[in-house]
Image (cartoon, grey):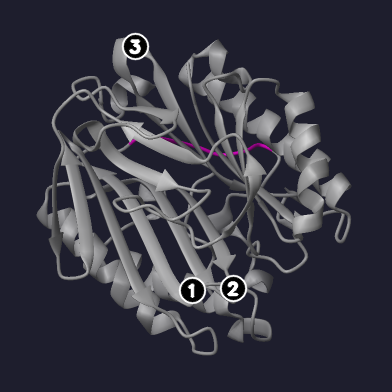
């Protein structure tokens, strides 16, 4: 299956904790505090042992800026970063549509049309009622831009959308000329097939995307995952129960990935795995951290206070792992 995916052997993409030299970092995420030259989430750091995340390569990295988009490129891999002011009281649809239009146009112009991973951070994600909720308006803007650029469901990628307390829209995209392998969770309805009750446009992301890595390995990028079974939230208001359901979802997705990619090592997280954990209530973090360390000893964790896309969800986890 990975033979059909983008090959990153030539640049040797790996994701590791800590800072790496800029000339070998395709991108860096500073999670515990802002740092020059690193992408940020605009979220409060709660703890863990993953303060910074480096996506490193074995080839030289070129970088530049076009308008308000920063870019970094290594071989066939292109990273795009866009940040704009975002009024938490405003409708974000047009701003999001415009941002994605510019990002997708730049990716296409660079010959890197295929989306591999997306991160989205915006303020007041749950503000507004019904279809006026800011997350639903965000989904409308993103979907409109993707549709205008000709993307179908099969061309979506792993993604995260989290609400911050910072009045800024942050969108980060990892792109390439060829697609990765998308993987869905048997326990969940694909997000892009959610029923109308969740908004006029379904969320535009795959549950996970895998890339062929160096030495025949596979790099698995898991989308923000929460306590959703089918398409419904379960255990509303109970952070501990939601975490257990979330763990079951991750275990299901890992098993599906290991089978689909014929990589048994992907069936569980290990010391190579990095998890970003978003909790709505900061007070829930210590218990969440203890449980995850118990379930997957050795994984690196970053705890961040962020609002999950549904107001009844209290915990969300994204991950990257390789085998």
Residue sitting at 83 percent across and 42 percent down? Answer: 287
Q: Is residue 183 magenta?
A: yes
Is tag 2's residue or tag 1's residue first in the polypeptide sequence? 2
Is tag 1's residue or tag 3's residue first in the polypeptide sequence? 1
Numbered badge on residue 138? 1
Cα separation, mark 3 vs mark 2, equals 39 Å
Asked whether residue 233 is in view, the answer is no
Picture coordinates of residue 257, whole percent (x, y): 54, 26
User: Callout 3: 10 Å neighbours few (<14), some, many (20+)?
Assistant: few
Picture coordinates of residue 320, whole percent (x, y): 50, 33
Mark 1: which secondary structure? helix
Mark 2: which secondary structure? loop
Residue sitting at 81 percent across and 52 percent down? Answer: 284
Cα separation, mark 1 vs mark 3, equals 38 Å
Q: Residue furthest bottom?
A: 90
Picture coordinates of residue 318, whole percent (x, y): 57, 43
Numbered badge on residue 125? 2
User: Callout 1: 10 Å neighbours few (<14), some, many (20+)?
Assistant: many
Residue sitting at 27 percent across and 45 percent down? Answer: 175
- Up-down: is 94 above or below 223? below
Numbered badge on residue 56? none
User: Label 3: which residue?
Assistant: 216
Residues rendered magenta in the picture: 180-186
Is tag 3's residue or tag 2's residue first in the polypeptide sequence? 2
Label 2 with label 1: CB-CB less than 8 Å: yes
């Amino acid at each position: 299956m990975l033979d059909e995916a983008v090959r990153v052997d030539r640049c040797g993409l790996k994701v590791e904790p800590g800072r790496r030299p800029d000339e070998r970092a395709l991108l860096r995420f500073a999670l515990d505090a802002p740092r020059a030259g690193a992408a940020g989430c605009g979220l409060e750091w709660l703890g863990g042992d993953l303060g910074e995340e480096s996506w490193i390569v074995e080839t030289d990295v070129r970088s530049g800026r076009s308008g308000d988009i920063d870019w970094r490129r290594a071989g066939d891999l292109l990273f795009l970063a866009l940040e704009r002011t975002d009024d938490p009281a405003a409708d974000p649809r047009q701003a999001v549509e415009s941002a994605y239009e510019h990002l997708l146009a730049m990716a296409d112009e660079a010959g890197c049309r295929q989306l591999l991973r997306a991160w989205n951070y915006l303020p007041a994600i749950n503000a507004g009622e019904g279809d006026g909720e800011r997350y639903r308006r965000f989904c409308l803007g993103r979907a409109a831009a993707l549709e205008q650029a000709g993307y179908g469901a099969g061309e979506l990628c792993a993604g995260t959308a989290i609400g911050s307390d910072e009045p800024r829209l942050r969108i980060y995209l990892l792109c390439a000329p060829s697609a990765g392998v998308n993987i869905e969770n048997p326990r969940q309805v694909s997000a892009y097939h959610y029923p109308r009750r969740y908004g006029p446009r379904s969320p535009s992301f795959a549950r996970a995307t895998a890339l062929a890595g160096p030495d025949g390995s596979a790099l698995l990028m898991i989308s923000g995952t929460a306590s959703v079974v089918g398409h419904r939230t379960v255990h509303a208001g109970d952070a501990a129960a939601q975490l257990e359901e979330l763990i079951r979802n991750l275990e299901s997705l890992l098993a599906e990935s290991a089978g689909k990619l014929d990589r048994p090592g992907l069936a569980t997280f290990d010391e190579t795995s990095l998890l970003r954990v978003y909790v709505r209530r900061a007070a829930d973090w210590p218990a969440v951290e203890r449980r995850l360390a118990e379930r997957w000893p050795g994984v690196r964790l970053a705890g961040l206070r962020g609002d999950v896309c549904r107001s009844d969800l209290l915990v969300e986890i994204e991950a990257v792992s390789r085998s």
